[in-house]
Image (spheres, helix red, strand yellow):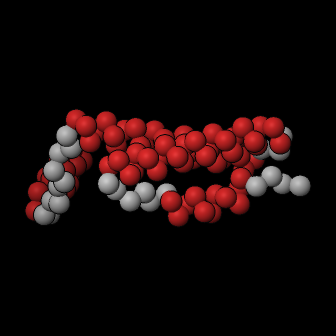
Amino acid sequence: MARGWESKSVEAQQAEASEKPGTRQPPMTPAEATRHREMEGLRLSRQRILTELSAQQDSRRRKMLEQALADLEQKIAKLAADGGTVDRYSAESAESADLRRPTE
């Protein structure tokens, strides 16, 4: 009996999903997909550096992380400018400036 209920639930979910109007985006070109992957990689690296920077106490290591962060932000800005899209992390850059300042 439990199997019957389970299959009916699956059927209902599939019917519900097929009834919903799908807002599919057009498929990306290979160049767009490459650019998207590169941007996501840069953003993930940026997030990792911000996390490390917020916990870092050693001033030499902080300086190195700040330089790496500046380099990543430059690459992200260039990639966003080349692609003609607005970088949603530009507002976050201002917030992260506080994290980049050395603590005393």
Q: Is residue 78 left or right of residue 101?
A: left
Q: Residue at x 61, y 46 (%)?
A: 70
Q: Position of residue 79 (x, y in %)?
A: 40, 45
Task: Tell me the residue at 11%/57% (across/down).
Answer: 18
Q: Report which quarter residue 38 is drawn in.
A: top left
Of residues 23 and 93, the one nearer the viewer is 93
Could you tell me if residue 1 is visible in this image?
A: no
Q: Is residue 45 above or below residue 6?
A: above
Q: Is residue 97 left or right of residue 81?
A: right
Question: Is 62 positioned to the left or the right of 24 in the image?
Answer: right
Q: Residue at x 75, y 42 (%)?
A: 63
> Where, quadrant-wise, is the C terminus in this rendering?
bottom right
Q: Foreground: 80 or 52?
A: 80
Name the side, left or right, on which 14 lies relative to 55: left
**Does any portion of residue 67 appear in the rendered image?**
yes
Image point (64%, 57%), residue name: 96
Res 94 → quadrant: bottom right
Quarter location, residue 52 = top right
Labels in figure, total: 0
The percent coordinates of residue 30 (x first, y second) are: 22, 35
In percent of width and height, residue 98 lies at 71, 60
User: Where is residue 29 shown, x and y percent of the image?
Assistant: 19, 40
Report the residue that reaches farthest toward the right.
104
